[in-house]
Image (cartoon, rainbow, N blue to C red):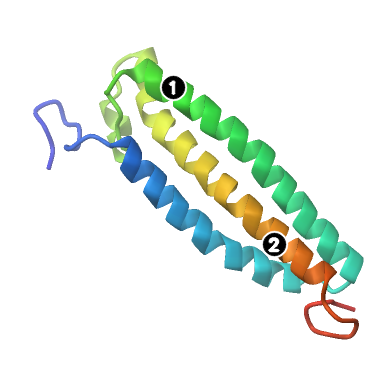
Amino acid sequence: MTGEDGIHQPRLRFRDVVLRALLYGLAATPLVGVASLGVSDHHDRMTFLAVTGGFALVGGGVFAVFGLVLWTACGGDIRRCRDWRTITGQGDSASVAAPVLVRLGVLALVLFPGALGLYHLVDGAEYESWIYGG
């Protein structure tokens, strides 16, 4: 439903943004596991998972904190990405960027323990198993 100013209603709620990001992060974890199987060497596979987990932790923290700062600065005027065309001033872009950054941050923070768990799974795998690598 669109309001009189062209903005989709109801506006985004923090709880909904975080829950969707949590689901995205949970769905991304098996994708990282499948992608790690494409790395054949054991040491390289562990490095891939460690770097992925590290980037997820640092990037997720930065995105989440910056998104929360923008969210609080917007006051309650949080818009969806499809409301980008309704932006009229310079400050209005934060109302679209805030939920995107919060969603990316939470997704990455959920991905971090998954990548860390996969790292320990590969580290503890038996030699010559398909999880161990070549």
| Relative height, residue 78 to residue 105 (above, below) | above
Question: Residue 44, image x and y in percent?
Answer: 87, 63
- Pointer 2 residue: 117
Q: In the rendered structure, which amino acid carries the disc numbered 1?
A: Leu
Q: In the rendered structure, which amino acid carries the disc numbered 2?
A: Gly
User: Do labels 2 and 1 touch, CB within 8 Å?
Assistant: no
Residue at left 84%, top 74%?
A: 40
| Relative height, residue 18 to residue 28 (above, below) | above
| Relative height, residue 91 to residue 64 (above, below) | above
Dot placed on the residue nearer the N-terminal end, 2 or 1: 1
Image position of 16 (left or right of 4)? right
Q: Quadrant of the N terminus?
A: top left
Residue at left 30%, top 23%?
A: 87
Residue 7 is labelled as none
| Relative height, residue 39 to residue 107 (above, below) | below
Question: Residue 91, image x and y in percent?
Answer: 38, 14
Q: Quadrant of the C terminus?
A: bottom right
Image position of 11 (left or right of 18)? left
- Along the line of sight, which residue is nearer the eye, 126 or 43? 126
Image position of 83 (left or right of 116)? left
Residue 70 is labelled as 1
Residue at left 71%, top 44%?
A: 55
Question: Residue 28, image x and y in percent?
Answer: 55, 60
Q: Secondary structure at mark 2?
A: helix
Q: Secondary structure at mark 1?
A: helix
Q: Which quadrant of the figure has residue 16?
A: top left
Image position of 47 (left or right of 24)? right
Q: Which quadrant of the figure has residue 86?
A: top left
At label 2, counting other C-alpha atoms closer than 10 Å, the crowd grade (few under 14, some 14-19, many 20 or more) is some
